[in-house]
Image: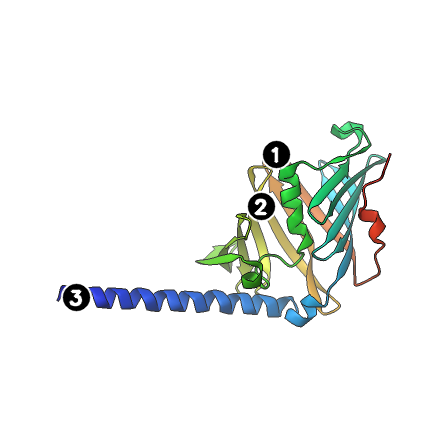
Amino acid sequence: MKTNKLFVATLATLISVASYGQSVDEIVDKHVAALGGLDKIKAVNTIITDRSLAVQGMEIPNKTTLVVGKSVRTESTVMGNSMVQVVDGGTGWMIRPTMMGGTGEPEDMPADQLKQQLSSLDPFGGLVNYKEKGNAIELVGKEKLDKKDVYHLKVTTKDGQVMDQFLDAETYLVSKVKISMNGQDGEIDLSDYKEIEGVKFPNTMEISNPQMGAMSFITSKVVVNSKVDESIFKRPVK
């Protein structure tokens, strides 16, 4: 009798694990399809995004130039001062104005900041091609978020970074991400997706964490696969 109970319990566990794995892959497949499909996503080589950043009552123009999987440069103008952050391969540098604790000259990007910035080289996130990337995904469950049904997925990247992603149960697009920002828990709300060259991008990002407070990024323009002068990623020589 005990043997039979053990067998039934083991079988139930195996069936549960199998169906659980299928559920994760089914959700991820629908997410990829909602973004535009894997072929369209893989065809994106460069992305140039113009945004407006609203923080502490200020409107800050922001431009990001990305060579997918390789390099990214973000430029902002704060009260007439230029702020630059660049990741090129596995290294990073930045320019901070004196009003933000910098010198106005190029400096090394801190290791913890570099680790976070490296994720921006992958604009479509850890769900797309997650197995090839070495990521692990756990389906936490179906929940309510802002009165809408969402799928809660826990993503653990190959380098150990953990984030919670919430996918709208109707559109299968990411509506919220919870992730550590500079050692503190932060949230990113994504909305107003627009299709560019067959691929959907969120036009609005609301970012909040205890250290930085609340910030809103509103996209004004996205250009896909335009030619990029890769010299913009090279650190200036004094």
Residue at label 1?
A: 211
Q: Which label lies toward us, 3 or 2?
A: 3
Label 1: how many residues lie within 10 Å, few (<14), some (14-19) or many (20+)?
Answer: few
Residue 128 falls in image quadrant: bottom right
Residue 70 falls in image quadrant: bottom right
Query: Which residue is drawn at the image coordinates 72% and 70% (left, top)?
Result: 198
Query: Which residue is drawn at the image coordinates 85% and 54% (left, top)?
Result: 229
Residue 142 visible to the viewer: no
Q: Tell me residue 227's x, y (percent).
A: 84, 60
Label 3: how many residues lie within 10 Å, few (<14), some (14-19) or many (20+)?
Answer: few
Left or right: where 45 falls relative to 4: right
N-terminal of the two: label 3 or label 2? 3
Disc ID at residue 203: none
Disc ID at residue 3: 3
Residue at label 2?
A: 187
C-alpha distance separating marks 3 and 2: 48 Å
The amino acid on which the numbered mark 2 sits, given as a three-letter code, is Glu
Residue 81 visible to the viewer: yes
